[in-house]
Image (spheres, rainbow, N blue to C red):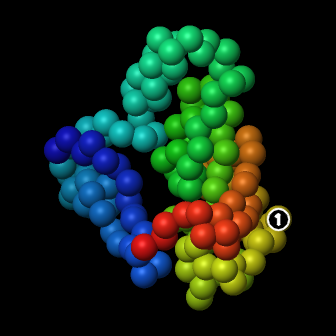
């Protein structure tokens, strides 16, 4: 099996999570099947992105960052290729953050998680270079981001 989108979950417009293609590939692997991945966090996709940045004249890695809401796909992938990472915690990890289990992603009632909760997540995945807590909330409150 070739899995070109290894994401394991997706956020629906109503805030619920859906299991998607990456989870199917993992299940197939557990059954003994062979799976090849060609998406984040695979280094090939990041290598290609960095080649495109060089073609555009950006060669200083300190001017490049991977921004994303998934510690597994976005942040690990960026860290592996040596660029800064910026985590937006209001996405797929919403239910992992203490105090937010019933509010879901992008909820205006989300609370900032405890340092202990964050450290546990970072031990499971990797620690981002930066974190933009409140990005989704601020953008949503100003009405400048479409969430449906």
Residue 44 rendering spot, x and y as whole percentages = 39, 26
Which residue shows up at 59% across the image and 63% down it?
144
- Number of numbered callouts drawn: 1
State the residue at coordinates (60%, 70%).
Answer: 143
In the rendered view of the protein, which quadrant contains the C terminus? Answer: bottom left
- Quadrant, the N terminus: top left
Q: Is residue 106 visible?
A: yes
Please rate how many residues cluster around mark 1, counting C-alpha atoms within 10 Å: few if below 14, some from 14 to 19, many from 20.
few
Q: Residue at x 67, y 73 (%)?
A: 141
User: Quick check: 39 left or right of 138?
Assistant: left
Q: Say whether residue 37 is left or right of residue 40.
A: left
| Image position of 111 with respect to 68: above or below | below
Residue under label 1 = 115
Q: Is any atom of residue 90 visible in this view?
A: no
Spot occupied by residue 142 in the image (x, y as percentages of width and height): 67, 69
View extreme (bottom): residue = 102
Element type where label 1 sits in the image: helix
Is 138 on the left or on the right of 31, as rendered?
A: right
Q: Is the residue 119 above or below the residue 4 in the image? A: below
Q: Locate residue 7: give its quadrant.
A: bottom left
Q: Position of residue 53 (x, y in %)?
A: 51, 19
The answer to whether residue 86 is above or below residue 133 is above
Q: Residue furthest front?
A: 143
For residue 136, which quarter of the picture?
bottom right
């Amino acid at each position: 099996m070739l899995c070109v989108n290894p994401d394991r979950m997706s956020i629906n417009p109503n805030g619920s999570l859906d299991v998607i293609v990456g989870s199917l590939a993992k299940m197939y692997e557990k059954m003994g099947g062979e799976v090849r991945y060609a998406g984040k966090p695979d280094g090939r996709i990041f290598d290609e992105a960095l080649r495109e940045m060089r073609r555009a004249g950006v060669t200083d890695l300190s001017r490049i960052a991977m921004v994303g809401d998934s510690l597994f796909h976005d942040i690990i992938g960026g860290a592996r290729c040596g660029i800064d990472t910026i985590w937006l915690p209001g996405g797929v990890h919403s239910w992992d953050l203490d105090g937010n289990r019933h509010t879901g992603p992008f909820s205006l009632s989300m609370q900032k998680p405890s340092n202990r909760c964050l450290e546990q997540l970072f031990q499971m995945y990797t620690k981002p270079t930066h974190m933009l807590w409140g990005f989704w909330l601020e953008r949503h409150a100003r009405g400048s981001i479409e969430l449906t």
